[in-house]
Amino acid sequence: MAGHNKWSQIKRKKGALDAKRSKIFTKLIKEITVAAKEGGPDPDANPRLRLAIQTSKAVNMPKENIERAIKKSEDNQGEYSGVTYEGYASNGVAVFIECLTDNINRTVQNLRTIFNKGNGSLGVNGSVEFLFDRKGVFIVARNPELLLTDDELLLELADGGAEEVEFDEAYLSIYCAMEDFGAMQKKVEELNLQAETAELQRLPKTTVAVDDPEAVRKILKLIDALEDDDDIQKVYHNLELTDNVMAELE
C-alpha cells in the first residue's frame, strides 16, 4: 500500500493541493450536496456529510461555501449521478475512476479525450475493477499532545480495526477493511486525531512497476488530467513508483 500513496504524498508535500484549491472546492461542494441530499442535512446524523465537511474544513473552504452546498441539496438542485469508469494508461497501468456528473455524455467524451491524449484507453465495466480492493483509508495529522508511543498508538488503532498503519513525521496513514470504516472513524475521533482525509478507496491488489522516468511522467500526466476534470471525484491506479523513479520525480 505504501507505494500506492507515494505520489499523493509528494503532491501534498510540494503544496500542489493549494495550487488546485478551486478544483478541490468544486469536487467537495459536489460531494457535500450529494451527501446531504442522500442522507439529510444534519452532519451528526449523516456520516458521509460529516466527512465531506471535515475534509472541506481541512482545505480551508469558507463556511458559507459549505452552507450553500447543503442548501443546494435542500432546494433540490444538483441532480448528480454516481458512475464509475475503467481503463488503462500506457505500460499496462490500470485506472479506476469514480465520477459525480449531471451530464454523462459530457463526462464520457472528456474521458475518451484524456485517455487518447495520454496514450491510454477507456475500457468496459469490469475490465480493471477486479484488480482493486475497497479499503477504508485515513490520513491523519500527528497530535503532539497525544502522550502515546508509536507502538502504543498502533495497538489503539488496531483495536479500532486498523489492518496497517504507516508512520511519517507529520502524518499517519491508516488502512482498515471496508466493513470496519465506522469503527475506525470512531477510534480516530476518540484519540483526538485530525483526519485530513477519511474515505473508502480502491487499493491495488498488485502493482505495475515502470522504471523509465519519462514513461512514468506521461502516466502521471494522464492521471493528473483525469483528476483535474470537474466530473471526476477520485482516480485510482496500480502504478508502482520505484525508488529510482522517485528520486527523479523529487
Image: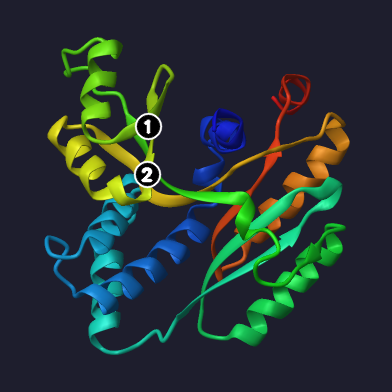
On the image, the x and y values in percent for residue 166 come to 43, 24
Number of marks in the rendered image? 2
> What type is the residue that disc 1 sits on?
Glu
Q: Which residue is mark 1?
A: 163
On the image, the x and y values in percent for residue 152 come to 22, 14
Q: Which residue is mark 2?
A: 177
On the image, the x and y values in percent for residue 160 come to 22, 35
Eyeballing the image, is 121 above or below 203?
A: below
Specify few, some or many for label 2: CA neighbours under 10 Å numbering under 14, 14-19, or 20 or more: some
Evaluate if marks 1 and 2 touch, with contact meaning CB atoms under 8 Å apart. yes
Which residue occupies 67% across, 64% down?
Answer: 86
Q: Which image quarter holds the N terminus? A: top right
Which residue occupies 60% across, 62% down?
Answer: 97
Specify few, some or many for label 1: CA neighbours under 10 Å numbering under 14, 14-19, or 20 or more: some
Which residue occupies 41% across, 52% down?
Answer: 200
In front: 203, or 52? 203
Q: Write down the quadrant of residue 206 in the picture.
A: top right
Q: CA distance from mark 1 to mark 2?
A: 7 Å
Horizontally, residue 209 falls left or right of residue 48, namely right
> What type is the residue that disc 2 sits on?
Ala
Q: Write down the quadrant of residue 125 in the picture.
A: bottom right
Horizontally, residue 152 falls left or right of residue 92, namely left
Q: Secondary structure at mark 1?
A: strand
The first of marks 1 and 2 along the sequence is 1
In front: 200, or 107? 200
Which residue occupies 83% across, 59% down?
Answer: 120
Horizontally, residue 218 falls left or right of residue 95, namely right
